Amino acid sequence: MTTRSGLTTDIVDDAVYRRTISQFRAAPRAIPLPTFAQLADPTRVPASIRARLASVDPDAPDPLNLFRVHWYNEHPGRRALAPAPAHLVLPPSLTGVPATIVVLLGWTFPMIQAHKVLAAYACLAPRLVTGQFDPSRDRAVWPSTGNYCRGGVAISRIMGCRGVAVLPEGMSHERFEWLARWVRDPGDVVRTPGSESNVKEIYDACKELAAQPDTVIFNQFCEFANYLVHQQCTGRAAEQVARALMAKTPGLRPRAFVSATGSAGTIGAGDHLKRALLEESAGEFKIAAVEAAECPTLLVNGFGEHNIQGIGDKHVPLIHNVMNTDLVVGVSDRASDSLDVLFNTPVGRAYLADRRRVPKATIDQLAHLGLSGIANVVASIKLARFYGMGREDLVITVATDAAAMYASSRARFLYQALGGALDPVSAGEIGGQHLLGVATDHVLELGQRERERIFNLGYYTWVEQQGVPVDAFVARRAQSFWRGLESLIPRWDALIDAFNAETGALAAAAKERL
Ligand SMILES: Cc1ncc(COP(=O)(O)O)c(C=O)c1O
């Protein structure tokens, strides 16, 4: 597979660079690019652009929506930028544990209502400003288990280039519907065999596509920009939320970041949090990787099928900083499917309100958790139980997307598992089993040996199968490798600033009439 490292900070092809500048200057409207620093802290976005956002539909392919590709979107309208990331604090009456569990809500991101659009932008922007991708000629290929390819197609459309989605045929109907509306040509949606757990088949399709001319594969599983953008943007957003909660509740101690791993981009936020909150956590901050118990790749090198959509498995992504991961938590898709029904049906909501005394505002927000977000919540409860966490402990997790993507999957589960409808008895059973009764099975604390086992498992995908040089693979063992990546961000930002100055797009966007 011709995956390019994407880590260049020099202009590699001046002709391509120049062509990209003229395209971005002229394209129906000039296209300004946000810097990584602005996406981490949108108060740095020029006030003139921020003011213009109020008149832009957050779900339209409008270039200004690039300035919404971050955690700070006001909700529910998502028109203005928010001073703090959208998040939901789960009450103990729901989780059954006294620890505070807070969920960052990814549905507030523009266009795809999932945070994977952030990873897509982060992988493309450095290529554009280094002359490695020609939007007038090249097509961008986005291998995915469902949301990253939507993010990539959205970003491609804004940039005026062809975006190709590669995803398993078994992913939710809603994703394919969205893609049909956004791709330039129906042939730009490539369906690979299988589901969630068939990432190898995605790589195979990419290999075939890469053999065709003018094709650039943005492989999120080995693109370090995906790791970096989460480490910088998601990590800082989560830190801000944690600090605000700690200020409100003196004595609250950050203890863990819990994240399912698909490409292992999101879990990169944990690297930032572990460092930034070192003192407040008394050096005990844990990073927990979540996977499906039905396909326990990290737990036991296992394999299988599951329905926690977005969590690809049977491989260890190249961008997973395994040696800094502290636990693996397996969650059954039976739990995520069942809770998805509980959170999104009138009978389930009545159970939560009447029997569990969950406030209505919280119940409304639970619809903002997609299947992997629910799995992250269950994993957070497991973790809290495992460590016997109390009221003073804070666990931070993420919901990548929202329930809206899973209506068809929910209908299927309701029919197959619950006879077509949820009744009050089944609602009570689901709440009892998958919230109050969450056990500490499938939890593995990683010592040196276990970390090495998981790290080494990646060898078979990356060195043997995908041809990554063994030295480059092994270098990722050292934490200095991951720290070293951070120096790319200011260099890419300087290139983005220079690019914007050449296109004049920022100034043009600011001047357009409201
Ligand atoms: C719904 C959903 N959850 C979780 C993930 C995993 O996130 P990451 O790829 O950053 O590990 C993805 C990735 O595509 C996803 O779409």
Image (cartoon, rainbow, N blue to C red):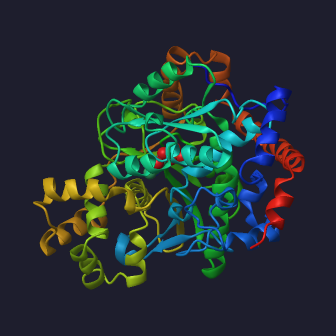
Residue 176 position in % (x across, y down): 38, 46
Residue 17 at x, y = what percent?
Answer: 82, 33
Q: Is residue 280 visible?
A: yes
Question: Can you say whether 136 is above or below 376 in the image?
Answer: above
Q: Nearer the viewer, residue 242 or 30?
A: 30
Compared with 246, 289 (above or below) is above
Looking at the picture, tell me which residue is in the foreground, 67 or 303. Answer: 67
Residue 499: x and y in percent read 85, 44
Say which quarter of the image contains residue 430. Answer: bottom left
Query: Looking at the image, how many numbered discs can be counted on the residues?
Result: 0
Q: Is residue 330 above or below residue 209?
A: below
The residue located at (69%, 69%) in the rendering is 53
Q: Quadrant of the N terminus?
A: top right
Q: Is residue 239 above or below residue 178?
A: below
Residue 484 vs residue 289: left or right? right
Q: Quarter of the image for the C terminus: give it.
A: bottom right
Residue at 63%, 56% (x, y): give it.
Answer: 234
Direction from residue 483 to residue 304 in the image, left or right? left
Q: Position of residue 421 (x, y in %)?
A: 14, 66
Q: Taking the image as drawn, is residue 281 in sight?
A: no
